[in-house]
Amino acid sequence: MRLQFPEGFSAWRQLRLGADRGRRGRQQLERLVSPGPDQGRFRPAVADDHWNRWREDCALMAGLHLPIARLGVEWARIMPERGQVDESAVAHYRAELEYLRQLGIRPLLTIHHFSNPMWFERMGAFPNAKISTISSPLPSLCADRFGDLVSDWITINEPNVYATQRLFLRRLAPGHKKLPRPSPCSKTWPYCHIRCYRMLHETREAMGYSDTMVGFANHLRVFEPETPAIRPQAATAKAVEWLFQGAITEAMSTGTFRWPLRNHWKLPKGEYCDFHGVNYYTRSTVTGFADGVRKNSPRNDLGWEIYPEGIVRCAQKLEKASRPIWVTENGTCDNQDAFRARYLYEHLEAIVQSGLPF
């Protein structure tokens, strides 16, 4: 059976790349490969082995008639050491991008998806505001080497989650003891995105292309008070939504910095976002500043509420910005939330007819 998506429907297929077994230790998430006391359930060494089975995976996508494939580059593969470029890794990515285009699939390329090379980690990584200038070779290299094959770009995947997990919960950097303030990372991400946005447009324009689309993918949630009639809960829900996703989305899209963010880089206001990438998973029920789940709600294996209607509600909030909305991730798949896909399929026509710029 062929699943036919409406023209322009932007539900992207994301590929997770398994770590190259011969290159362990070059990026910080690979520290989880050797299970420690808190890391036994994480085994990222092989994942879906896409690095080795990419031709088979691309053929499967073509068999599903997918018009677009979202994939990312691994910084530690391309630049295993500072100032060094692994040309074989660059050639590997080019071969896959070329093959996707031959199959009639348009690639959506993500430049940074959480993981950093260890050499970058040792220098302080993104929480160190001064380090952002060192990160610029990666997007520049991607633009130069892949710009003829890629028109659609995501600069950073879930900058709000990266900041939350790394700086507050410390889940992405095991072994760190101190809890740094969130402001360094929060101010660095907008700077990196805006600089990358300009560079991608300028580089591809110099190549003769005028179809460049650059955005970032944020993890968006619906935040609702457990009891709307309780005013402190209602106020807290609005505050948590702003702190988690509102402030950084505005700063990265327009260069407008509002509390708690500050424009340390003196970036001019402007338009730095050609589309809104939406990674949607769940709704948060708010009683305080801790993440909550609605009582007696259906939940997935992560304990998150299964709330498919939320993707429409998140899109409706972004509609005011008059930018296209691209669904870049959707759902945590398990045996309990299969109805999420059914809900979207059944309501797809209504969503498209609603006028939302999907």
Image (tube, rainbow, N blue to C red):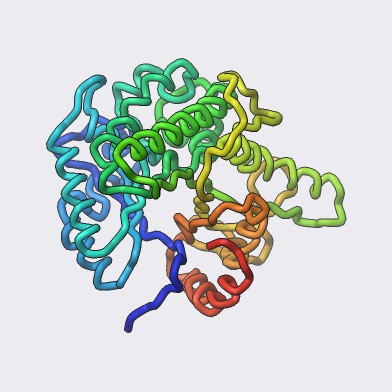
Q: Is residue 291 left or right of residue 98?
A: right
Question: At which x and y percent is residue 237?
Answer: 74, 47
Above or below: residue 168 compared with residue 66: above
Q: Quadrant of residue 351?
A: bottom right
Residue 280 seen anywhere in this rendered image of the structure: yes
Residue at 40 percent across and 46 percent down: it is: 212
Please tell me which residue is depicted at 45% across the width and 36% down the height of the picture. Answer: 197
Residue 38 appears in the picture as rendered: no
The answer to whether residue 148 is above or below residue 84 is below
As rendered, which of 30 and 183 lies closer to the eye? 183
Rendered position, 29 above or below 308: above
- Work out whether residue 185 or residue 291 is closer to the camera in this orientation and state it: 185
Q: Position of residue 302 (x, y in %)?
A: 49, 55
Rendered location of residue 342, percent (x, y) = 49, 77
Judged left or right of residue 44, residue 332 is right
Q: Residue 214 at x, y = what percent?
A: 44, 44
Q: Is residue 273 left or right of residue 114?
A: right
Identify the image quadrant of the N terminus: bottom left
User: Residue at image x 17%, y 34%?
Assistant: 23
